[in-house]
Image (cartoon, helix red, strand yellow):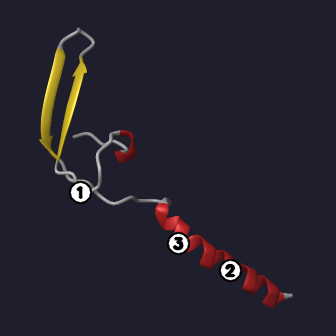
């Protein structure tokens, strides 16, 4: 099993198949395709764009209330 950052592979969310080509350290060429499952982002990514502004607004509001 392998894990890759989707944005570095060209695979789009929802793609169902991926192919890999390469060369071993011994110089043997290989190629293969298989079914894949893509998953939405995890961690702080695009979601942060939607969550951060309200959090900063609330933080500023709270700071003004404490003064």
Q: Is residue 14 left or right of residue 56?
A: left
For the residue labelled by badge 2, is the local secondary structure a helix, a strand or a loop? helix
Q: Residues within 10 Å of mark 1 (few under 14, many from 20)?
A: few
Q: Number of numbered discs present? A: 3
Quick one: label 1 or label 2, which is nearer the N terminus?
Answer: 1
Q: In this view, does 54 lie above or below 26?
A: below
The disc at residue 57 is: 2
Residue that carries the numbered disc 3 in the rendered image: 50
Residue lying at the far top of the rendered structure: 26
Label 1 to label 2: alpha-carbon separation: 35 Å
For the residue labelled by badge 3, is the local secondary structure a helix, a strand or a loop? helix
Q: Where is residue 59 in the image (x, y as percent from the top left)?
A: 70, 79
Q: Would you say the residues marked 3 and 2 are in contact, meaning their CB atoms lie under 8 Å apart? A: no
Q: Where is residue 56 in the image (x, y as percent from the top left)?
A: 67, 75
What's the residue at 30%, 43% (across, down)?
3
Residue that carries the numbered disc 1 in the rendered image: 14
Residue lying at the far right of the rendered structure: 67
* Image quarter hosting the C terminus: bottom right
Q: Where is residue 19 in the image (x, y as percent from the top left)?
A: 19, 35
Quick one: label 3 or label 1, which is nearer the N terminus?
Answer: 1
Q: In this view, does 4 lie above or below 15?
A: above
Label 3 to label 1: alpha-carbon separation: 22 Å
Residue lying at the far bottom of the rendered structure: 65
Q: Would you say the residues marked 3 and 1 are in contact, meaning their CB atoms lie under 8 Å apart? A: no
* Image quarter hosting the N terminus: top left
Front residue (pair 10, 30)? 10
For the residue labelled by badge 1, is the local secondary structure a helix, a strand or a loop? loop
């Amino acid at each position: 099993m392998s894990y890759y950052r989707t944005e570095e592979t060209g695979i789009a969310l929802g793609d169902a198949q991926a192919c890999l080509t390469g060369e071993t350290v011994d110089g043997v060429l290989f190629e293969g395709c298989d079914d894949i499952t893509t998953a939405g982002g995890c961690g702080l990514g695009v979601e942060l764009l939607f969550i951060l502004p309200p959090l900063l607004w609330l933080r500023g509001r709270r700071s003004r209330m404490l003064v």
